[in-house]
Image (cartoon, rainbow, N blue to C red):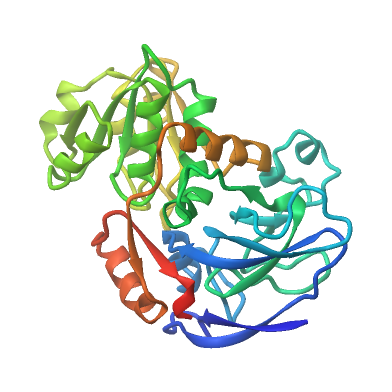
Amino acid sequence: MTTVAAYAAPAAKAPLERSTIERRAVREFDVLIDIKFAGICHSDIHLVREGWGEAIFPMVPGHEIAGVVSEVGPGVTKYKVGDRVGVGCMVDSCRECENCEAGQEQHCVRGAVQTYNGIGRDGEVTYGGYATHVVVDENFVVRIPDGLSLDVAAPLLCAGITTYAPLKQWGAGPGRKVAVVGLGGLGHVGVKIAHALGAEVTVLSQSLRKKDDGLKLGADHYYATSDPKTFEELAGAFDLIVSTVSAPLDLGAYLSLLRTGGALVNVGVPEEPITFHPFSLIVGNKILAGSMIGGIPETQEMLDFCAAHGIGAEIELITASEINEAYERVTASDVRYRFVIDTATI
């Protein structure tokens, strides 16, 4: 065991504070990573504040981890000391079920082990990336291509794969009209990826406040959903809508924007249930779907794609002492577009 510095929430809704945690000794197939940067995801805030249910405390959040390998176990074959690597939302799975064998570890039948707020297969609580170091099995580590700076790559380990997976699954590409709901931490990366895939991209946001940003990031069109005319003008316009927001939406209104056979895919998770009338789906054979992250192979594919297209997150780099302030700013939508912690300040 090794003691490392971290920022932890001691209890639900409590401010995060500097602390120490124990990392396991490097096992045969483990990689020790010197964490350089850790992104702040809205999920971190939901979990620290128990917005999605009971959580485990003390909690060290962080599942957008970018760093450098500093030690490898004797059985490790994929990485060596000095490699640039990342860790996303999970650090283990059963590796035996149908989903794991298909490279869909995020849907492990026995439950993937979350990077933090989880229980590992060894029975130990997992702690995330708001720390100086982490130990992870090599099979749940991905390589960050040289073309990506570690700071802008960190958010891709959640925000990148969370938007890349549904865009790929639902066929975003040339000749397809794609809408991204929300231009935040997830949405801004989704716009970049959808544009790079060749789709015609529209941002649907509450206001036009970020319109200039959206167009610079690759959107072809930008509409305010607070304007009722938007839903009239865009009725039946889209093949695919990806909702990245964690606020409850009027699903019926958004489903009306789909073409026949179109799909509305949710990657944002409100804390409250949402209701809608089934006729919203039945008329036009429309699809309401959800999407998590991707498996390890698809996460690596996403990173390689982003490197090839020069895609990184738009970030605001902060010190560890600014984490609590950053949480308040995220909930107030006051960030463009992802806070990233410089872990050297922990």
Give the residue drawn at x 30%, y 54%: 337
The residue lying toward the viewer, choosing from 90 and 235, is 90
* 153 is higher (above) or lower (below) than 123: above
Give the residue drawn at x 76%, y 50%: 139
* Residue 298 quadrant: top right
The residue lying toward the viewer, choosing from 41 and 157, is 157
* Residue 86 quadrant: bottom right
* 175 is higher (above) or lower (below) than 187: above
Query: Residue 338, can we see it?
Result: yes
Q: Is residue 154 left or right of residue 319?
A: right
* 114 is higher (above) or lower (below) than 12: above
Q: Residue 2: percent from the left, percent from the top?
A: 73, 82
Give the residue drawn at x 47%, y 37%: 306
Q: Residue 322: percent from the left, percent from the top?
A: 34, 78
Query: Residue 276, can we see it?
Result: no
Q: Residue furthest front?
A: 82
Q: Residue 159: percent from the left, percent from the top?
A: 45, 48
* Residue 315 quadrant: bottom left
Give the residue drawn at x 77%, y 74%: 124
* 80 is higher (above) or lower (below) than 179: below
